[in-house]
Image (cartoon, rainbow, N blue to C red):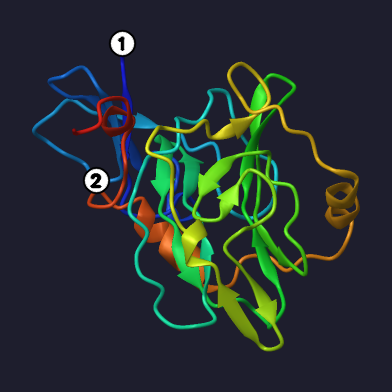
Amino acid sequence: MVLVSAALARPAWMLQAGEVYKSVDAQGHVVYSDQPDMSVAQTRVEIAQPNLYSEDGLSATEAPPPLPDYEQPACPEDGYLWTPGYWGWNAGGYFWVRGEWVRPPRVGVLWTPGYWDFVNKVYVFHRGYWAASVGYYGGINYGFGYFGSGFAGGRWVGNSFVYDKSQYARSAHIQVSYHGGPGGTSLRPTPQEKVLALEPHTPATPIAPVRRSAAAHPRTAVTHAAILNPRP
């Protein structure tokens, strides 16, 4: 079986056509990189998505890998909310975007994670957002309070966020990372979530794209091989 990994030091929206290079390593893994390497045989790849995070509707023809198990870093200070990691997509295939503690744009809002959805034979990404209530995120069990519906990691009390630390854990087994299609989750949105989807939302805070760009760096990217062959 051919596995795919990505080693992109820059986000997809910064890359121009012909700046991504494809090669095959000694284990038969297909590797994509934005750095030329004269020690291996590389071919150039056209970039189909010029702006990865510009809007909803980013699509892929293959399903995202399972969610990996990972350690949640300590909350930097009170008032920050956890935004779980997810699979991003660019010319090199899927790459892991690590979860982050993020200061919400204002008091009283909660984070609805983005999710992949199988629609018309392709996988479409729906971006996450801030709102007064947690909306639908495909029934994906991201852990750390996001167990498929709603958020169990705490609540706002006045101007302070009260954490329920007992909910900040992930199950030990690998979880499915998309809704619908073969092997995907099947949870449908509730009437309340359907109403919330029509209300105004606040997109990710400005710090999020900076951290996403770092997520595709060779030192932080999680490859398919690492997920399919986890270390004991």
Tell me which corner region of the image, top left, top right, bottom left or bottom right, holds residue 27: top left
Position above or below: 29 against 144? above
Q: Give the number of the mark in front: 2 or 1.
A: 1
Tell me which corner region of the image, top left, top right, bottom left or bottom right, holds residue 44: top left
Residue 35: mark in rendering: 2
Position above or below: 96 against 134? above
Query: Is residue 83 something that shows in the picture?
Result: yes
Residue at the image position 69 percent from the left and 19 percent from the top:
121
Q: Please give the count of numbered marks on the rendered protein.
A: 2
Distance, label 2 to label 1, CA atoms, is 25 Å
Q: Nearer the viewer, residue 46 or 215?
A: 215
Furthest residue toward front? 166
Residue at the image position 61 percent from the left and 76 percent from the top:
104
Residue named by callout 1: 1
Position above or below: 178 against 125? above
| Secondary-structure class at tag 1 | loop
Tag 2: amino acid: Gln
Pinpoint residue 151: horizontal percent, then vertical percent.
64, 57
First reached walking from the N terminus: tag 2 or tag 1:
1
Left/right of residue 168 with respect to residue 19 in the rendered view? right
